[in-house]
Amino acid sequence: MKVALSGASGNIGSLLRRELPRCGIELRSAGWKPSIAPQHESEDVMNGDLRDAAFVDRFLEGVDVLIHLAGTSIERPLPEIIENNLIGLHQVYEGARRKNVKRIVFASSNHAFGMHPVSAKLSPDAPFRPDGLYGLSKMWGEGLARMYWDKHGIEGISLRIGSCEPRPSNFRHLSTWLSHHDMVSLALSCIRAPAVGYLAVWGVSNNTRSYLSPLNCAEIGYSPRDNAEDFAAEIMNQPNPLDSIAQSYQGGAFVTLDFTPEQERPKAAQSFCATTT
């Protein structure tokens, strides 16, 4: 089975690029800015713009599964979000259709749900409540993944990634942490799972304080091992860097960006917000 990995120069991409071949996965990695170089003689590496159809066709030639991590991964101005997370993603899906890629694992995000209050426990069918343009683009990406399964038969797994870090380091991570071990395990499950059609799963570890339940991962055989609670005592002894708004919503600091305080909103909106959050 040939697996392609886009966004291989990012934090998660670098992790998977290192670990997946150790698990027997034949991997083709793509970077662009920054570009990547082979780490060993047999490594299959390409650099190019995923908005370029010719490059996408070369990248996906002979590929069975694509793990798509490329794109803007933080809150940025709308033109950049559109170019990388909408136009680039559409080019990738069209290339997958041309090259008969069987499955795409799409890196979605918890920020597509970031405006849910921290008191909520979200099931996989929870309504989207994006906390910014980045989260909104992931909402669109999940819709694209669903459409390409329904219309073109390309299997899709929307992987709603939490906070993928070597270890949790702040209050929010106690609920959103995805350990490096569990990220690799989750990627392998997405690659190796039998027919899935279309599926959305929460990409987090087995955190006691998780915002998310159930994870919807049984169908792909993912069982997270790690728990951010193991680090809770250390974290709880630190000051919380998030302001009161960020502490109230699952998206954390992303929510505070360009946030309109309730007292500055139209009166009807203030009243509605007070009863729903």
Image (cartoon, grey):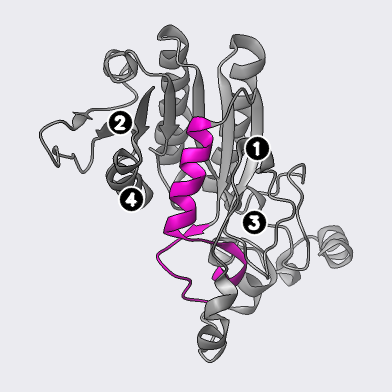
**Number of the label disc, if any, that sits on residue 15:** 4
Q: Tell me which corner region of the image, top left, top right, bottom left or bottom right, holds residue 13.
A: top left
Residue 224 located left or right of residue 4: right
The residue type indicated by label 3 comes to Gly
Q: Nearer the viewer, mark 1 or mark 4?
A: 4
**Which residue is located at x 34 percent, y 24 percent?**
51
Of labels 3 and 2, earlier in sequence is: 2
Q: What separation in Å lies between label 3 and label 2 (alpha carbons)? A: 32 Å
Mark toward the start of the polypeptide (1 vs 4): 4
Residue behind mark 3? 114
Q: Is residue 102 left or right of residue 43?
A: right
Q: Is residue 92 above or below residue 126?
A: above
Query: Which quarter of the rendering shows the N terminus?
Result: top left
Q: Amino acid at mark 4?
A: Leu
* Highlighted range, magenta: 163-192
> Circle 1 sits on which residue?
200
Q: Amino acid at mark 2?
A: Leu
Provide residue 184's location: percent of width, then percent of height: 43, 48
Nearest the viewer among 104 and 56 is: 104
* C-alpha gap between disc 2 and disc 1: 23 Å
Percent x, y of residue 262: 74, 68
In three-dimensional space, the C-alpha distance between marks 1 and 4, rounded to whole angstroms, equals 22 Å
The image shows residue 65 at horizontal and vertical percentages of: 44, 24
Give amino acid for label 1: Ala
Q: Nearer the viewer, mark 3 or mark 4?
A: 4
Instruction: Tell me, yes or no, whether the highlighted magenta stretch contains residue 208.
Output: no
Percent coordinates x, y for residue 197 in the rendering? 65, 22
Residue occupied by mark 2:
27
